[in-house]
Image: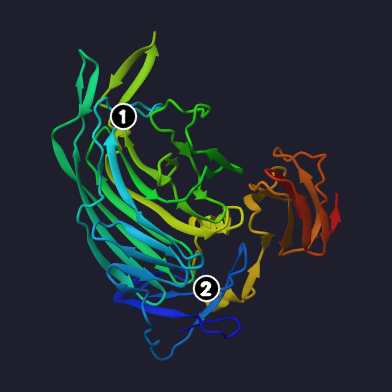
Amino acid sequence: RLFDSDGKEADLYEGRRRDTEKVIRSNTDVTTALKCHEVAVQFVAESVPAMGYKSYVLRGGSHVPLKTPLAQTPAIVENEFLRAEFAPDGTLSLLHKPSGNTYPGLHVFEDGGEAGEPWTRKPPARDKIITSRGAPAQIAIVENSHLSGRIHVHTEMMIPVGLEHDTEYHDTWRSEEEAPLAIDSFFTLRKGCPYLEVETRLENRHKNHRLRVLFPTGLKATHSAAEQPFDVVERVIPRGKNHPYRDTYNPTYPLLRFVALDDAHSGLALLSDGIREYEAMDDTQRTLALTLIRAFEIALCTVSYRWEHLPEMLGSQSLGAHVFRYALFPFSGSWQDSDLLQEAERFSLPLLTGQSTRTEAKALTPQKSFIQVSPASIQLSGLKRAENGRGLILRLYNPTKRKVNARIDLGFSPRRCSIVTLEEKPSKERYRLKASGRSLTLAFPPGKIITLKISAGHVVD
């Protein structure tokens, strides 16, 4: 059993057991290997301090009694925030319990031809769009406890192996020859978590195609909101005559950790761990699409607008094994009113665990926060040693459209704190920076980056 420093027992689930060997390395003794009995456990780490740590102690005791698991059937997984129900074709209906909104028909795979090059997305003249909607899928529970439920959905799509070209008439179309594309998606819902995690794995053996996953939101949204460096950019969806991309095939845009649609009453966000392209479709369902693969032939415009095609360069075809990680996060209100920024951070930077001996633990307090920034809308961009070696650089930014009064609580007493530029030179800006004990406060304008230089010991420049 696990206990925190206050003696409170952690909510724990005992999983896999196995006999194995572990290598023990020590700075004061020889390295050795020991046979051991390994037990994998899940537990809820409550109230871990911001940018800090919390210690737990393992103690012997009786077996933890089993509790009701989150996955009741192979097609349903549910916690206090969400209920996901899978259809026979592998799509899911997601209920957001706090708002009562249901998002049906989510997670459809779509595959189309790709005749473009590195800079331009271009479908073939005669394209063939294939989706997983309506095709039978295999659905099974692969992990199930009261702390997490994990459902595996296996999908197979028959898609063309490449493109055919008619150089005389400059025509392109998807090949008649097809081969299966097997896709395995693992959906994980955890206790106390407001989003549904997805890990999709596949082996790409096809060329010149684009594979996406679609999420018809059903929202009456007019704009998408996607995180960019130091900002959240809102982009108009309806492609009227004044839309900058009204004549393109389909305008895709970049994202960092999330893209969201909302109608001011409710919304749905897709959290991303490495996926960098999305489209918010101007259709009746306001479908969000994440691009998983865009496999294309290398073509270079080297001289006099002549294209040099290099089909032997296969790196651009994205062949081989792929793992994609993303999550579905429904919320109430607008994206600015929700916990979207905080949950995107939690998804992309999960907690890390480490093991300590009794001797090492004595050098540290049972728990500690080194730096805490509030409210959650203020984002941490960088924390590093100053380039001149004197002081700590803390870079924050406000991606919202609102002025925010921010507070920074330090795990040490600051001797001096000043606002500097991105080049770490003195700035004339002040933003009402104030210090009180181990806390700093400042008024954060919307869309602003502020860099602080802090040296340990209470003077504010």
Badge 1 is on which residue? 123
The quarter of the displayed image where residue 129 is located: top left
- The residue positioned 40% from the left and 33% from the top of the image is 250
Labelled disc at residue 45: 2
Q: Vertically, is 38 above or below 371?
A: below
Residue 112 visible? The answer is yes
In the rendering, at what x and y percent does residue 246 appear?
46, 28
- The residue positioned 15% from the left and 38% from the top of the image is 178
The amino acid type, in three-letter code, at marker 1 is Pro
- Observer-side mark, 1 or 2, equals 1
Q: Vertically, is 411 above or below 128?
A: below
In the rendering, at what x and y percent does residue 256 appear?
50, 45
- The residue positioned 24% from the left and 16% from the top of the image is 170
Q: Residue furthest left?
A: 177
In the rendering, at what x and y percent does residue 148 appear?
39, 71
Q: Residue furthest bottom?
A: 62
The amino acid type, in three-letter code, at marker 2 is Ala
Bin the neighbour count of mark 2 within 10 Å (Cα to Cα): few under 14, some 14-19, many 20 and up: some
Q: CA distance from mark 1 to mark 2?
A: 48 Å
Q: Vertically, is 88 above or below 446?
A: below
Between 85 and 386, which is closer to the camera in this rendering?
A: 85
- The residue positioned 23% from the left and 23% from the top of the image is 172
Bin the neighbour count of mark 1 within 10 Å (Cα to Cα): few under 14, some 14-19, many 20 and up: many
- Quadrant (top left/top right/bottom left/bottom right) for the N terminus: bottom left
Labelled disc at residue 408: none
The quarter of the displayed image where residue 173 is located: top left
Between 176 and 293, which is closer to the camera in this rendering?
A: 176
The quarter of the displayed image where residue 17 is located: bottom left
Q: In the shown orientation, is residue 97 left or right of residue 234? A: left
